Every structure is written in structure tokens, then in C-alpha cells.
Amino acid sequence: MFLVVFRNRKRADIDAAAYSADAQAMEDLAAQQPGYLGFKSYTADDGEVIALSEWEDEAAALAWRRVAHHAEMQARGRAEYYENYTLFAGTPTRVHDFDRQA
């Protein structure tokens, strides 16, 4: 598994409807990519967002990064939506599971 964590804060003046539509379009497009495993996003009380995408491997995540429409949307995000962000990507070095049902 390869994880991409996108930690961000949006600008106060964004067009929320446009952002929501663009985010949904990117989520739908990512789900069609080979190696895509899943996506979830969490928003903290202070507005910080953590978006987590899971991929089979690094090659799949890198292929997603090179999808032309995704690259265009990244540029739009920097120009119109985000105040700041940090992206973390890698393979977990340790994984611990607990499942009461198992």
C-alpha cells in the first residue's frame, strides 16, 4: 500500500460550490485509475483538512499525479483554493490492525 496525505487549509474567499464540484470530479476521476484503493477526507474544527488517498503502490500514485486533468486541477487549487498545504507520500513502515469482530 502507498499513502498520500494532503494536509491543507483553504482560502477564506474561495467559491465553495466550485471547490466542491472540482473536488468531487477529482475523486471520481481518481477512483477510475488503476491501483486506486480509496479516499477519505477529514476536517478539523479549526478548518484544517486531512485528505488521505490509498494506492496499491507508488507507481499507481505517480501515474495519478501525471493525469493531465489532475495536474490542471492542482494548478487551479494553488491559484484559487488553497491558503497552504503539505503533501506527505510513502509506504507505511509499520501497520497495526485491531478488529474486535475478527
Image (cartoon, rainbow, N blue to C red):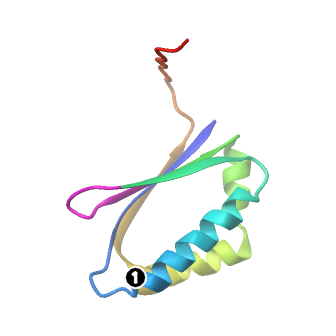
- Identify the residue at the far right of this view: 34
Q: Nearer the viewer, residue 89 or 52?
A: 52
Nearer to me, 9 or 98: 98
Residue occupying the point 57% across, 70% down? 24
| Outermost residue toward the left in this view | 46
Q: Give the range drawn in magenta.
A: 43-51
Furthest residue toward front: 101
User: Is 45 on the left-hand or right-hand side of 9?
Assistant: left
Between 2 and 27, the residue placed more toward the observer is 27
Say above or below: 26 vs 51. Answer: below
Disc 1 target residue = 16
Residue for point 69% across, 77% down: 69
Q: Determine the residue positioned at 73% across, 69% down.
A: 67
Assess disc 1: are there few (<14), some (14-19) or many (≥20) residues with their C-alpha within 10 Å of its C-alpha.
few
State left or right for residue 67 relative to residue 9: right
Query: Residue 4, position in %: x, y?
Result: 53, 50
Q: Magenta stretch: residue 66 in it?
A: no
Residue 66 position (above or below residue 87): below
Q: Position of residue 8 (x, y in %)?
A: 36, 64
Secondary element under disc 1, as helix, strand or loop, is: helix
| Residue at x 46%, y 14% (from the top left corner) | 100
Q: Position of residue 84 (x, y in %)?
A: 34, 71
Amino acid identity at mark 1: Ala
Quarter holding residue 10: bottom left
Residue 93 versus residue 14 in the image, above or below: above
- Say whether residue 44 is left or right of residue 87: left
Is residue 44 on the magenta stretch?
Answer: yes
